[in-house]
Structures are given as C-alpha cells and as structure tokens.
Amino acid sequence: MASRRGPLVFFFKAAIFPTPGGLRSLTRPIALAYTGEMKSGSPSFQPRRSSGVTPIDLVACDLDGTLIGRDHRIHRDDVAAIRRLRAAGVHFAICTGRSIIESHDVLSELQLQGPGVFVTGAVVADMADRQTLHRRTLPAAAIARLIDFFSDWGHSSLALIDEDASPAPYYVLTSHGPVHPATSEWFVRNRVQARQTTQLDGALQRHVVRIGIVVDRPETPRIEAELRRHFGTEIYFLSIKAPLFDCHVIEVFHPAVSKWTGITTLCQRLNLAPETVAAIGDDVNDIPMLRQAHISFAMASADEDVKAAAKRTTLPQTQAGVAAAITELFDEGRIVSGRHGT
C-alpha cells in the first residue's frame, strides 16, 4: 500500500456549456407497450380499468442505462410517454446517482418541475431551479478516515460537496494517487473545471454528500471487504461496474442514504403516500427503490440481481423501456387522466 501523505486537494465545479447535437425533443405520440406491441399514446386511447388497483401518483426513474443510453440521448417514445404521464397529473421524478448539475441536459430536455432525487438519494433538489431541498451528508468523523483508508490503497478520493453557499455542487479530489483514466474521461464528459487548494478542512467536511474512488476490477473485492471491516454500519457504499472500462466505481454515503430514502423524502414534500410510487431502474444503486416501490420495473439489460429486486421487467433502453413501463401503468388503470388533475 502507498504510504500516507498530507492531502493536496483540487476543487472541481461543473460548468454548463451548449452541447452540440444535444437531446432531441421529439413528441411523436407512440409508446412501446411492455409486451412489445405498439399502443396509441393519444388522449383518445381508453385504458383498461381494473377494480381495486393501487393508483400511481409518482414515477421515479433512473437515468443512465434506463432513460438515457450510452449516446446520452432519450428515446423519442420515452419523451412522449413522460409527457403523457405528466399531462395526467402524475409526478415524474429523476432518481439518479448523478448530481443535479450532471443531470442538466436531461432536465432541460424534459422541462421537469418539482423535486427529484440525486446523488443516489443523498440529495433531493428542485428539478427546475436546481436548488437543493434536502441533503444527507457523510458523518464528519468518517470522512478523514475514509480519505486515509483510500490513500493507504494508493487512491485519490473524489468528494462531492453540496452547500448552500455555493451556486452548484462541486468536487474535491485528493492527491493520494494517480487519477484513474475512467475518472479523467468522466471529467471531460461532464465538462469539469478544476482549481487547487491545500486541504479538505472541517468546514468542507460538513458538506460532503459522497466520497468515491475508481479501482481496477481485480482490486475491487479486497477494498470492498476492508471497507466493511473498518467502517461497518458507519457508512453505506456501492460498487458499480463502469461498462466502458475494466473497473468499478466505489461510492460512499451516509448510512441512511439510498434511492428509496430519497424517494420517501420527496413523498413527504409532495404529501404523497410511498405506496403510490412506481420505480424504474437498471443498476445496483436502484435495488432499494425497486424492492420497496409498490410497482417496479427493471430494464431487460439489467443484471439478474437487479431484476430479482424488481416486481417486473420492461424493455431495454434502446427499445424505449420507460415508455413501455408507463404504458403498462396506463393499461392497468393505475393512471387515469383527470383523476390527478392536469
């Protein structure tokens, strides 16, 4: 392991630039049904009504691999289905591991309003004005130990800072090891700018919502085991496969953080019952919400453990799986235009 050194820290702040060929706003009123059959999405389509079904007031939807593909675009049928859902008065909430700034293009494309869930549930923020409404920060006592722990393994720690004093979330990177190529590419993809500082002081530690590292796959199981041994229930962490690299992203949060706890916070703000939530996702950080939501859909491309956590499976992102799930909710009479208002 690398020897421990005093931290050199860099701040990273996301900057928004126009994206050439950005997400298209196509509104063709067609959606793929869950069975693969084409169904009309026009207002004249009459849903099949089932007696005794629980109505859905909120649909929580993951981004990467669920609503957007590797080309960072939304399927045009998903766009149409989401608009139909919102026209029926159902709240559509992004529920993602990204920060609010990293979700900018999608939020702008769909013109979403009201609260959404970000940073795997550590942050609930308004999807229109981008302001944080609720945050759950890492325990301050664990942050320095986490940075030292990752340093001993030769890794820089990437911390996400969310504080009221800053107009947007920003990143802090310690200098305990080389920056992984996957991290460098992520900086480029998200148009991150950097400035240097000398320490992660106590004031900053009070605003850390996530600490993460990127590790090569052979090293991952050992670090996961040591994290459990050294920190136990002090933290909640995820190990997510990076599909374009032979590596994992290990992300650490407050122990009470998950996408489902973020959803329950969102429900409290909207005065909605958690029993009226439907969730759609495809990765390990979606498992808590897929298990707990009254109705949940795993994408067909998801790993088997993710599918096992969901109540149902929908089509892959490339075939408008979100539209298929929404169409199924309409078909079952769980969403009825006019019941929720418009």
Image: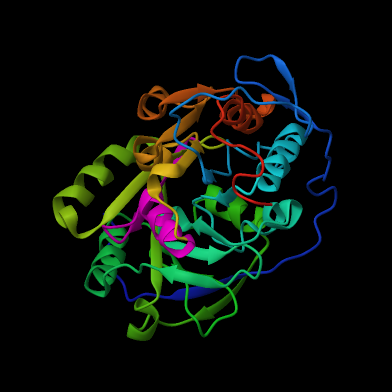
- Residue 193 appears at what percent x and percent y? 64, 70
In screen coordinates, is 130 left or right of 222?
A: right
In the image, residue 92 sits, relative to residue 245, either above or below, namely: below
Q: Quadrant of the N terminus?
A: bottom left
Question: Is residue 255 within the magenta segment?
Answer: yes
- Residue 163 appears at what percent x and percent y? 47, 78
- Residue 132 appears at what percent x and percent y? 51, 71
**How many numbered callouts?**
0
For residue 177, which quarter of the picture? bottom left
Along the viewing direction, whichever of 342 and 22 lies nearer the viewer: 342
In the image, residue 147 sits, relative to residue 81, either above or below, namely: below
Residue extent of the magenta highlight: 246-270
**Colouring mode (rainbow / by chain / secondary structure / one colour):** rainbow
Question: Is residue 160 within the magenta segment?
Answer: no
Is there any visible trace of residue 158 in the rendered image? yes
The structure residue drawn at horizontal position 57% and vertical position 25%, both measured from the top left corner, is 49
In screen coordinates, is 311 left or right of 337?
A: left
In screen coordinates, is 324 left or right of 212?
A: right
In screen coordinates, is 126 left or right of 83?
A: left
- Residue 42 appears at what percent x and percent y? 79, 31
The structure residue drawn at horizontal position 40% and vertical position 26%, both measured from the top left corner, is 311
The structure residue drawn at horizontal position 37% and vertical position 57%, both measured from the top left corner, is 155
